[in-house]
Image: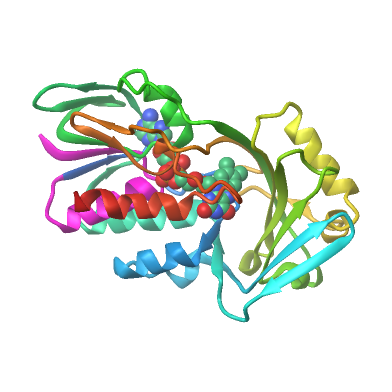
Amino acid sequence: MHDVIVIGGGPAGSVISYILANKGFNVLLLEKYGKNRYKSCAGGVSTVSMITLEELKLRIPEEVIEAEIYNARIIHKTKELTLTTGKLGGYCVYRSKFDQWLRDSAECAGAEVKHECPAYEVKIYKDCVEVKHRGGMSKGKILVGAFGALGILQFYKQLGIKEKPKFSLAVQREFILPDEDMETIADTLELYFGSDITTKGYFWIFPKTKSNGASVGLIENIPEPRMTERLDKIISKHPVASKRLARAKPINISGVHLSGQIVACSPINKPYGDRFILIGEAAGLVEGFAWEGMSTAIRSAVIVPKF
Ligand SMILES: Cc1cc2nc3c(=O)[nH]c(=O)nc-3n(C[C@H](O)[C@H](O)[C@H](O)COP(=O)(O)OP(=O)(O)OC[C@H]3O[C@@H](n4cnc5c(N)ncnc54)[C@H](O)[C@@H]3O)c2cc1C
């Protein structure tokens, strides 16, 4: 019998496992995919995430940081506005490495971390919870659902959650750029807005400077058809983006070049019940302007154990 079973080894599930294991609880963390799994994400880590992690004595290792961000550039058609405070405003990471570091930190704190271990079914009883997963079944006193947007669709009925969050849809490609093209975006997040691009979303180029990489994507707050086609049209035709990416070459990160994923972007009213609670994106906790979800995932992982 575990004290806590956590489903999902993203930032929310890994950080709560780390905190609870450090407090001496017996924690089982189940992650569906293998080590260094790809996660569709632009990888922008805000100062809120950085500060929260540092408060937990989790300093992001140098080898995980791909870029230090000092500027944000807003682009509309051919007009560009660069905003800067002159201070470090965040990092860019590849989630494969960042999340693996968080899962390893949870393991070092004493959590039992199982990779390639998808949870199939959850049952909530009066005195315990049961999770069926690859390789068997585990019992615990409490269940934490940190399974992200796709997990909600899998588990909301089993947990008796009445309301699903709203979903946005994002697509992303990973590229590598020549040195001279990296210079313009090396420490800058580029956000492209305008009706020529999206109806209610934005297009981005987020740098992975150390690897000469760039994550390039498009999000819409109402899932729209032909997102990949639209992404590719922006990459090849937008007056600014097409110049930035003219010599970009597709690369695979943890085996993935093109990804698409729903993003849960409205908080669920009651993300808890007897013996379970949802945190992070599983609870719909994604900020509604830039769809930033890592800081809310990490903050929710910090707040919940306080209760
Ligand atoms: C294209 C794109 C770009 C984004 N860019 C940014 C950005 O730059 N900055 C930012 O802050 N946010 C960004 N987001 C949002 C951010 O990725 C998420 O909000 C954040 O990852 C949520 O963290 P989480 O731990 O709650 O869930 P997730 O990171 O989704 O982690 C959930 C984990 O649960 C696992 N899982 C799911 N089902 C099961 C199961 N049945 N059994 C076991 N494990 C399971 C998954 O494999 C995954 O590892 C982006 C999202 C997308 C789609």
- In the image, what residue occupies the spot 33% across and 45% down? 13
Whether the magenta-drawn stretch holds residue 6 is answered as: yes
User: In which quarter of the view is residue 143 placed?
Assistant: top left
User: Residue 181 vs residue 200: left or right?
Assistant: right
Q: Residue furthest front?
A: 269
- In the image, what residue occupies the spot 82% across and 48% down? 235
Q: How far across and down, in percent of the image, does residue 78 sit? A: 90, 59
Q: How far across and down, in percent of the image, does residue 177 sit? A: 76, 61
Whether the magenta-drawn stretch holds residue 216 is answered as: no
Identify which residue, 23 or 73, lies in the foreground: 73
User: Residue 283 vs residue 247: left or right?
Assistant: left
| Residue 254 in view | no
**Span highlighted in magenta in the image:** 1-26
Q: How many marks?
A: 0
User: Residue 25 vs residue 79: left or right?
Assistant: left
User: Residue 100 vs residue 266: left or right?
Assistant: left
Q: Residue furthest bottom?
A: 86
Q: Is residue 95 above or below residue 47?
A: above
Quadrant in the picture for the N terminus: top left
Q: How far across and down, in percent of the image, does residue 284 sit? A: 45, 38
- In the image, what residue occupies the spot 88% across and 59% down? 243
User: In which quarter of the view is residue 260 placed?
Assistant: top right
- In the image, what residue occupies the spot 52% across and 44% down? 39
| Residue 257 in view | yes
Q: How far across and down, in percent of the image, does residue 203 sit? A: 73, 48
Q: Is residue 99 above or below residue 269?
A: below
Task: Tell me how the rendering is colored.
Answer: rainbow
Identify which residue, 108 or 218, lies in the foreground: 218
